[in-house]
Each structure stands twice: as C-alpha cells, then as structure tokens.
Amino acid sequence: MSTTDRRANLRDTLIDLARETIAGEGTSALKARTLAAEAGCSVGSIYNVFGDMHELVMAVNGETFRDLGQAVTDAIVASAATTPTDRMITMAEAYLAYAAAHPQLWRALFDVPITETSNLPSWYLEALDELLSIIDAPVSDLFPDLPPDAVRLRTRALFSSIHGIVLLGIEERISSVGKDNISDMIRFIVESVGK
Amino acid sequence: MSTTDRRANLRDTLIDLARETIAGEGTSALKARTLAAEAGCSVGSIYNVFGDMHELVMAVNGETFRDLGQAVTDAIVASAATTPTDRMITMAEAYLAYAAAHPQLWRALFDVPITETSNLPSWYLEALDELLSIIDAPVSDLFPDLPPDAVRLRTRALFSSIHGIVLLGIEERISSVGKDNISDMIRFIVESVGK
DNA sequence: GTAGGGAATGAACGGCGTTCATTATCCGTG
DNA sequence: CACGGATAATGAACGCCGTTCATTCCCTAC
C-alpha cells in the first residue's frame, strides 16, 4: 500500500470514528487525543490530514449532507404522492425523520461558527443549494407562473420554516412537544402554503 | 453598603459586562479571566456569584428574553394593524428586527446546550411560553373555533417557522439573502397561514 | 546500501474553566 | 473598644483542551 493510500485510509478512518463520536455524544465530545487513540495514531497525524478539528467536523458534515439529501430524495421516489402539497409534506416528513434518527449528526450541520460566511466552504452552500433545488420542483408546480428566483425564495421560506419547526421541536422534546405534534405543525404550515 | 448589596452590585456588573462582550464578539468570546479584569475582581469572585460561566450566560439570556418580548409587544401596541394576519406580520417583523439589531445576543438565546431538557431552568421555558402567549392572540382570532391546545400548536408552528427563516436568513446574510428577502419570506408564510 | 525527504511522533505550549487553601474583611457579642 | 467566628475575596494551581514543532522514523529512488 502506498503512502498516499495509507493517508487516504487514515482520512476515512478518522472521519468514520469522528462520525461515531458525534452521533453518540455530540460534536463537543470529539477530542483530538481520544480520537488519535481510537485511530491508533498520534495527535500530530490528525493534523497531517486535516488542518484542524473543525475541518474534520466539516468533513463529517459533508457526508451527512449527502445522506440527508439522499433520504429526502428516496422518500419522494418511494411515495405515491402526486400533488405538489403532498410531495412537499413527504419531503418535510423525511427531513424530520432524518433529524429524529440522527439528532447529533443533524445538529452538527448547523453548529458551524458563523463569524464569516466567506470561510464557509463553498461546497457547504452548494450542498444546501442542492437540497433546495430538490424542493424547488413541487414549489414550482404549485406556482407555475413564478420566475425561478421567486420560486427559490418560496422554497427557501418553506425549508427554513420546516427547519425551524424541527429544530425547536427536537430540542425540547421532553418538555411538551412529541413527534406527532411536530408532524402536525409541519402539515399545518405546508398545507397552508399549498392552499 | 452591606455585603449583600455589594454582592448584588457585582452580579449586575458582571451581567452588564458579559452582555457587552457577548453582544460584541459572541458567547464564545466571554472569558472568566478577562471578565474578572474588567469587573475589577478576581476570577474566584465570579464563582461566588454564579455557579459557572454558563449560568452567567443564562442570566444575560434572561434579560435578553425580556427585551425581546418587550420589543414584540411594543411593536404591536405601536402599530395600527387590525387584522390577525397584519398583527402576526407585525410581530414577526419585530422579531426579525430584534435579531438583526442584536444578532449575537439573540443567537445566545438558542446556543444553550440541549443534552437534557430538565437542566434547562424552568424560567427559560416559561419565558418562551410567555412569548408564545403573545402570539396566541391573533392566531386565536384567526381560528376562533379551535380549542386552546390547537391554537397553541399553530402558534408554535408559526413561531418556529419565523424563527427558522430568521435563523437561516441571518446566518448567511452575505451569501445571498438580504433583509428584504427575509421580510418577503416571512410575509409569504404568515400570509399563507392567514388565508 | 545508502542518501534524501516526507510522514509520524508525542512532549511541550498557551489558553481555558474551575477549584481551594490561604488571606482579608465584616459583624455580633462581651 | 476588643475580639472571634463566619463569610467573602483572592489568585496560584489543576486538569483538560487544541495545536505546534523539533526530532525520529521509514519509504523510495538511485
């Protein structure tokens, strides 16, 4: 095995272990020394692969984004939903299901520091853009006369709304709101938009 | 001045200084040593007043919550909005305005760790509850036949939606979405709900 | 076999929140 | 006023963190 291969191997190993830790105990539980011990390498080796720990989290997030997009797409393909509203509901429910199934990984997606948008990797905005473009389809069907920018604005509004409902819903799931309630809230908003 | 008074004074001083730091550079910029130097006391004294730094942030958040609620209430009182929909829009715009004016203080409200809901102070949930009860009024007017629980669920959905739009909108304000766009998204959602 | 260079190493650094033995201060009592 | 016990203030020290870098190791090309 060549040097390059081993390096790529270590990269994959680190990402896998990091994802496991994040999924189980959250981003803040990810420690360089612990990770190095788990991976069977030194702390320094981590920094030969990633510039810093944050970059590693972002690498995990990249894969999480792909998974999430796939989950939403799969849900649409698998469903028999026909009307734009039904399709939007299906997507939103898939989003909720993913967040509920992998709360810590999902949370890590939006835990990135936001001091400067410029230091967000470009693929990050592109990944979100891709997610939005999936939702564009039913929104566009719902408002066939609108130009693409206007459709995208409504898509953004809809996605942000669902995101907010899921976010606040999941965070205080003990207090009052159960998963059924979150579902009801999602349907209320989406159905309101879909006439 | 009695011991108790000075202690209360120190408490207020620390909260004020902490708010200044958080408002200017964010929660993560709040350091015990720096704060002690600014307040003219030792690091240990901070821990005589607050159990830990997190508790201090929560104290700041408590006042921020009051401010925010007041801002929303003031907006309603000042406006000539009559229809439920107009009143909801007024509230949502006030929420956006507050978040835009004090982004770091507003963000700190939702940066609390969420491992256990039980360790969230009860006044925290009550403060959010109070905010929701303000919004209940127009929602109840809009759906006069609904029982209080159902109204509250729709209120929650609406608030969460606006929150999500403001959250994602403010975070990437450089990239694409301007404040006007955020306003448009808010109106789109609220007006959809308001028929 | 060997020289060169990139990769691996882990001790060390600086910064953090938090603790706690020590010191200073207050206040009710004799 | 004097004194003693409780209470508050202090900041050095502790443990943990991410990150660095002088050193060592090992692979590869000649």
Image (spheres, coloured by chain):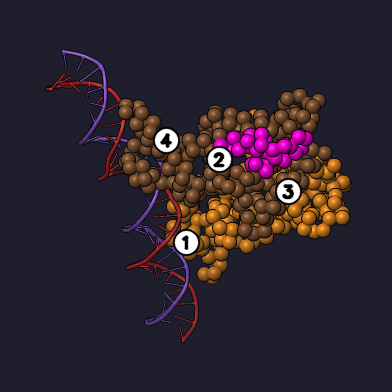
Chain colours: A orange, B brown, C purple, D red
- Residue type, label 2: Leu
Q: CA distance from mark 2 to mark 3?
A: 23 Å
- Magenta: main secondary structure equals helix
Disc 1 to disc 3, C-alpha distance: 42 Å
Q: Disc 3 residue type?
A: Met
Within 10 Å of disc 2 (Cα), the crowding (few <14, some 14-19, many 20+) is: some
Question: Which one is closest to the eye, mark 3 or mark 4?
Answer: 4
x and y percent of residue B187 in the render?
74, 45
| Screen quadrant of the C terminus of chain B | top right
Q: Secondary structure at mark 3?
A: helix
Task: Give the labeled residue for mark 4.
Answer: B12
Q: Is residue B11 left or right of residue A20?
A: left
Alpha-carbon distance for marks 3 and 4? 39 Å
Task: Report in which chain the residue with disc 1 lies.
Answer: A
In this figure, which residue is indicated by the disc labeled 2? B109
The quadrant in which residue B89 appears is top right
**Secondary structure of the residue carrying numbered label 1:** helix
Q: Chain of mark 4?
A: B
Cβ atoms at labels 1 and 3 below 8 Å apart:
no
Q: Residue at x 83, y 44 (%)?
A: A194
**Who is closer to the viewer here, B92 or A10?**
B92
Q: Which residue is mark 1?
A: A47
Q: Quadrant of residue B51?
A: top left
